[in-house]
Image: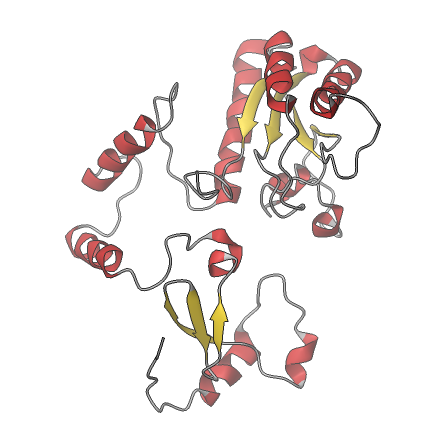
Amino acid sequence: MNVTYAPNDLSAVVEADRAHIWHHLTQHKPFETIDPRIIVEGKGMRVWDAGGKEHLDGVSGGVWTVNVGYGRERIANAIRDQLIQLPYFAGSAGSIPGSRFAEKLIAKMPGMTRVYYTNSGSEANEKAFKMVRQIAEKRYGGKKHKILYRERDYHGTTITCLSAGGQQERNAQYGPYTPGFVEVPHCLEYRAQVETENYGEWAANQIEEVILREGPDTVGALCLEPVTAGGGVITPPEGYWQRVQEICKKYDVLLHIDEVVCGVGRTGK
């Protein structure tokens, strides 16, 4: 693909970035001697930086967000038209695209009836955590408030989402964390914790052990990624999800599925 660039000098942009931008998951010390990378254009699955170098974007915008690719004029035109008609109105009232999209989304989610719009995965998980705590308060006098999360899973970078984060290297230096979050073992078969015929069921049973240790009357929810993403792209072994569902039903524990990374067709299915 041939991409023509305007002969603009971007050195001022590079210097502004170096001086003022705090980059995500990036060590900034090297920028004292080298230039930060500036991405200037994208087409399809490829992006180009300020130096004209082409990159194959294997992580969809850096954090799995541009899964439809770059340069989609149909999408850009739809966004433009909506910005002119009505760019935003708070969720205290409805909107035409909000209602239509919710209807389409629910059609692909059997058993679900409502959509709550948020700005990020962290905010979406925070909302789910608040729902668990509100249910605990309304139905159980606040006792069934604990939320279990799995080692290696990732749910966001707010303090409460870090409290539910199973990646210690991401969480370091940000404590103390929100109380009431309890870790359960991972289900990575490659680094199996025991040798057993049905590792999926065994791994799920470790969740039950944690519930029994904490007290079933104190555990309100279990928060899991369907496929652990940043923690290693881990697909749970066969039999895992069936057993997890049985355990949650047995102890009246809500199953909170965080599909921010791998949901809505992002696995290709």
State whether residue 142 appears in this view.
Answer: no
Q: In this view, does 98 lie above or below 238?
A: below
Number of marks in picture: 0
Residue 236 point in image, percent of width and height: 64, 32
Determine the residue located farthest toward the right in the rendered image: 194
* Residue in the image at 78% along x and 17% along y: 209
Front-most of 72 and 179?
72
Determine the residue located farthest toward the front in the rendered image: 197
Relative to 74, 144 lies left or right: right
Here the colouring is: secondary structure
Determine the residue located farthest toward the top in the rendered image: 250
* Residue in the image at 71% along x and 32% along y: 187
Quarter of the figure with the N terminus: bottom left
Q: In this view, does 180 lie above or below 57?
A: above
* Residue in the image at 35% along x and 91% along y: 7
State whether residue 9 appears in this view.
Answer: yes
Residue 254 point in image, percent of width and height: 56, 19
Quarter of the figure with the C terminus: top left
Residue 161 point in image, percent of width and height: 61, 40
Relative to 176, 228 lies left or right: left
Q: In this view, does 49 lie above or below 78?
A: below
Residue 166 point in image, percent of width and height: 70, 40
Identify the image quadrant of residue 213. Answer: top right
Identify the image quadrant of residue 41. Answer: bottom left
* Residue in the image at 26% along x and 44% along y: 89
